[in-house]
Image: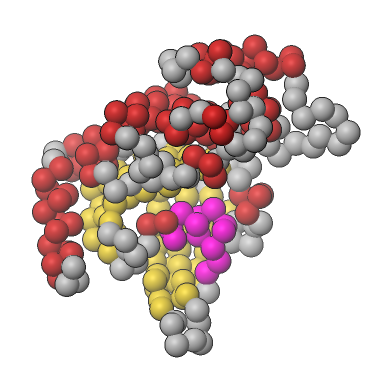
Amino acid sequence: MLELRNITKIYNPGEVTESCLFRDFSLTVQQGEFVSIVGSNGSGKTSLLNIICGSTGVQSGDILIDGASMLHQKEYIRYRRFGRVYQNPALGTSPNLTMYENLSLADNKGGRYNLAHGTNRARREYYREQLAALGLGLEDKMDLRMGSLSGGQRQAVALLMATMTPIDFLILDEHTAALDPKTADTIMALTDRVVREKQLTAIMVTHNLRYAVEYGSRLLMMDKGHIVLDAAREQKAAMAVDDILSLFTSISIECGN
């Protein structure tokens, strides 16, 4: 279980541009939940992910996994239990390395290389099997540089890399936003399958309201650092895209957008 307790986050404290995004913000994500988060720009969606992963600090509050605080853990320590897929495929992969080399790096997350080779040929067939399971024909392109692949192909590999080692939480930061609609649908279907098969707890930020409704077990809408909608299980299952859009539009009108 992941808990954020009474989080306060102030950007640029003491300066003219000081702004408080979260004040006494709390959120609990149960083990096995797939949470979709929607909201307008500036609502705090990505900041929330960054706080969870440790790339953004907070002024007060606590972040806990199964009751144990990880507030003062370094980012790389937290990533032993987290996998993250970003909006930009280039952030989750190394474009100048081959797919095989990228997978090898992900496979050794948390380990040490010392003076050993960065790749392990004994694992090559395993990588091939994992790529074949994606159903995109990538298993025959392992020796191509990642930068030569399409955005959708790179994002599929990034998803595989993020979940290659045992993790508890998968963080999805608008991971379909840079893709064309057909490819985005493919990546979402793959994401859903990976989350189910590996029994992960997932938190997904998305601007695609259809994905937020169709995928996952819980839906949050955020506005100015507050949760204005929290729908789970039967309540979420009964919601349609128009319901979310109506609330989203009403909030935007209130904000003068």
> As drawn, is 211 to the left or to the right of 120?
left
Q: How is the image coloured?
A: secondary structure
Question: Residue 253 lies in magenta, yes or no?
Answer: no
Q: Residue 79 versus residue 125: which sits nearer the camera?
A: 125
Residue name at image x 71 percent, y 39 percent: 110
Residue 195, visible in the rendered structure: no
Kindly indicate the quadrant of the structure image that contains residue 134. Answer: top left
Magenta region, residue range: 47-58
Q: Position of residue 214 (x, y in %)?
A: 24, 34
> As drawn, is 221 to the left or to the right of 16?
left
Q: Quadrant of the C terminus?
A: bottom left
Residue name at image x 38 percent, y 30 percent: 187
Task: Relative to 64, say whether 123 is above or below.
Answer: above
Q: How many marks?
A: 0
Task: Point out the residue furthest to the front here.
Answer: 148
Kindly indicate the quadrant of the structure image that contains residue 233. Answer: top left
Kindly indicate the quadrant of the structure image that contains residue 22. Answer: bottom left
Task: Relative to 173, say whether 100 is above or below.
Answer: above
Task: Point out the residue furthest to the right here.
Answer: 115
Residue name at image x 29 percent, y 48 percent: 207
Q: Position of residue 139 (x, y in %)?
A: 55, 15
Q: Residue 249 versus residue 1: which sits nearer the camera?
A: 249
Residue 56, visible in the rendered structure: yes
Q: Position of residue 206 (x, y in %)?
A: 33, 46
Residue name at image x 63 percent, y 54 percent: 75
Q: Residue 83 versus residue 103: which sits nearer the camera?
A: 103
> As drawn, is 72 to the left or to the right of 253?
right
